[in-house]
Amino acid sequence: MRVLKEMLRQPSAVFGLLVVVTVIVLAIAAPWIAPFDPDNQMFDGLTLEGAPMPPGGQFLLGTDTLGRDLFSRLLYGARTSLVIGLVANGIAVAIGLLVGIVAGYLRGFASSVLMRFTDLMMAFPALLLAIVLAALLRPSLWIVAMVIALVNWVQVARIIYTETRALSERDFIMAERSLGAGHFRVLFLHILPHLVPTAIVWGTLGIATTVLLEATLSFLGIGVQPPQPSWGNIIFESQSYFQAAPWLVFVPGFVILLTALSFNLVGDALRDILDPTQRGRN
Amino acid sequence: MTSPETAATVLSVRDLSVDARTPEGLKPVLRDIGFDLASGETLCIAGESGSGKSVTSLAIMGLLPKASLRVTSGEILLGGRDLLKISNRAMRQVRGGEIAMVFQEPMTSLNPVISIGAQLTEAIRAHQGSENAEAVALRMLEAVQITEPARRLQQYPHELSGGMRQRVMIAMALSCQPKVLIADEPTTALDVTVQAQILTLMRELKTEFGTSIVLITHDMGVVAEMADRVLIMQGGRLIEQGSAVAIFNRPEQPYTRQLLAAVPRLGAHAGTDGPPRITPQPAQPPAEDRTPIMNVQDLRVTYGSPASRFLKGKPQVHAVDGVSFDILPGQTLGLVGESGSGKSTTGKAVLGLIPSSGDVLIDGRNIAGLSQREMRPVRRSAQMIFQDPYASLDSRMAVGAAIAEPMVIHGIGSKSERQDRVADLLRRVGLTPDAATRYPHEFSGGQRQRICIARALAVEPKIIVADESVAALDVSVRARVLDLMLELQETMGLAYLFISHDMAVIERMSHHVAVMRGGKIVETGTRREIFEAPSQEYTRALMAAVPIPDPELYQKRAGAN
């Protein structure tokens, strides 16, 4: 409650929060709001020469090269992209946090094994790994989300590992141990809260990258399968018509940008509000 | 030596005011500071943290962080020019060329990836052109009396000791023959014996180069040793100025008197066996029990690993090398030594916080080989207070929760009982119970250390290891925290293992003293034995190096030479 109240005091956070809530509501309500079936290739949707319709008129944001309504596709695409950006990215951050914090706190053999595995994952081209995984498992939205999570946790793990190591050298951790605190207490009550800002920043930055990674996978035919729309694959499907129909790239591009920016704004505000040393400032 | 009255004024500060930009608006940091620096004079600016002494020096150097601090009025005159009005380009020539600065921490003010020679010649080239820069650099290193100066030019900062690094910083500052040298706490990060050498060097160089020195320090002992004149600052104002002898012998302002009274003087407790009494009546009679609360036998801490058949191993360093001592209930053992002597390592090892060998008996239980879990009951009787109170408190945990935590860990009391006890502990260390809901950053250094003491007391320990627990505090605050520790000892019968580099503080606090050097205890005995009749040369050297807050003594000595 306090968090929400403080957030409402910052204009940028209010803006971010509004956009995020709007996007989520639109995604959930897509079937009731969408003016057309997103997969319906309409005869009206193309000009007599067979070119997509520009924005305005009957189709609010124009149509794509197959005559489908762009606005409807964006609404349904929001569902896909939010699952990728929130769920897949969330899982990635969670795995990264767990691996990083355990490896950073434990030291010794277990830590070496975990971090060498992380390094191996980092050295391995993410896209190649995603292709292999996606080829082994039949692509569907949730499989794609899992694949993205499995590829994206490594950077988070690396950063969290370094921070945890630095934190466990700090005096207050030594002080906790001298009080008799066990590992569990030190890890979850004293180290984890200090990692929250990093996790929030990486989590919000990851939303844009994962949405675009999904688009790349779609482009390669191993992402979300057509005709199901996602913001990423709307851009990729129409990129060769960029000059003839620029709205097909700009509109979804702008939507991704705006959403990612809003999550970042909310994340930044959240980070400051949760930090007691920042309380009472601003 | 030129007498300050007749000498020309080199630097003159008039009505200097500086504001800080804070979220709540502009806040005054300096108010109407004015003083003159005479040629060949050493002027000490003394004050506690937050008094504005460092801001004054940064303002003179034109190095105030523009985003947060702004000069609102006043002038700084150097050779007839107002430094606040000249261009950045002209100011760059002044910095290093006419006014040079030496900072507190020589490691962080030298660039770790550039050789000493390159850093020295860079400054010389910038102000004097590039011919003979190498030769000048070598001559400067000779002037600061560094051993093997030619070899040092090729070395990197990490290869030098702290004292040598500070000598390099001074060489760099003096290389362009500045008129004014500003030294901001130049010896605070150094050991006492090294501090004594650096201060002597600065005095010699002052006469050799004819430089005026502005020395900023919190240490009244250093002031007495160095100053011709003294400025006392408090809360951004200049509250008193005068000759060193006048300030020390006839302080006019109450604050100055208080500052001087708080300075611990070596030998102040000569002729007594224990620390001064704080409470009128001891609540518990002096313990008749002569069984030590802590008994340490042949403690060893080794870093590195021995070579085995498969691994090459790392070079072994004996940080603590066969240390033995006893601490009786209700008494204090002062462990004194310079950096690298192994005193802090000893403090951590006796509480099982770092791996060690040897026997440590706490309240009759041997902690050797105990696991973290098995150690837990022992930790109820032995607690620790660290040097930096802010670093040893979790910044994301409210103070009340931090103090209650040891009770939660050891399963003491119900939630409401713990809350009552937290309030009680806070009162006991001189804070109000409403502190419980606030966070560590909202407190001052001394208050934070009180919080740490309250946390250590929460489980009613019998012994507390205090590792440099007052080193990070201002003198007046330091005296009050020491009094609190003595009072708690008297009322609760606590024993302390009191670790410090400061001989005067050790003298005040201890019943017994152990002097450490290179991982070994070189001398041990009652306080009286150590301070009144030290048998080891090293102990005597440590005591001789402590600056004494009496300027006349130094002037007599200088006259005798």
Image (cartoon, coloured by chain):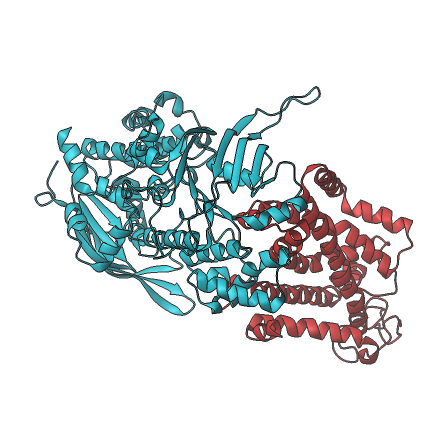
Chain colours: A red, B cyan
Front position in the image: A40 or B331: B331
Name the image quarter holding residue A94: bottom right
Where B86 sits versus B368, above or below?
Answer: below
Residue B33 visible in this rendered orientation of the protein: no
Choose between A238 and B174: the one closer to the eye.
B174
Please, is residue A41 above or below residue B546 in the view?
below
B553, A169: nearer the viewer: B553
Relative to B456, is A50 on the left or the right?
right
Is B148 on the left or on the right of A169, as rendered?
left
- Residue B152: x and y in percent read 39, 25
Instruction: Identify the image quadrant of residue B170.
Output: top left
In the rendered image of this protein, does residue A74 appear above or below residue B196? below
| Residue A212 shows up from this direction | yes
Would residue B414 be found to the left or right of residue A126 on screen? left
Report x, y in % for residue B31. Answer: 26, 62
Which quadrant of the rendered structure holds the N terminus of chain A?
bottom right
Where's residue B480, x and y in %? 36, 55
Is B132 in front, or is A91?
Answer: A91
View extreme (front): residue:
B288
Q: Position of residue A62 (x, y in %)?
A: 77, 73
Q: Please name the residue shown 60% across and 55% down the image.
A: A194
Number of numbered discs? 0
Residue placed farthest to the left in the image?
B6
Image quadrant where residue B448 sits? bottom left
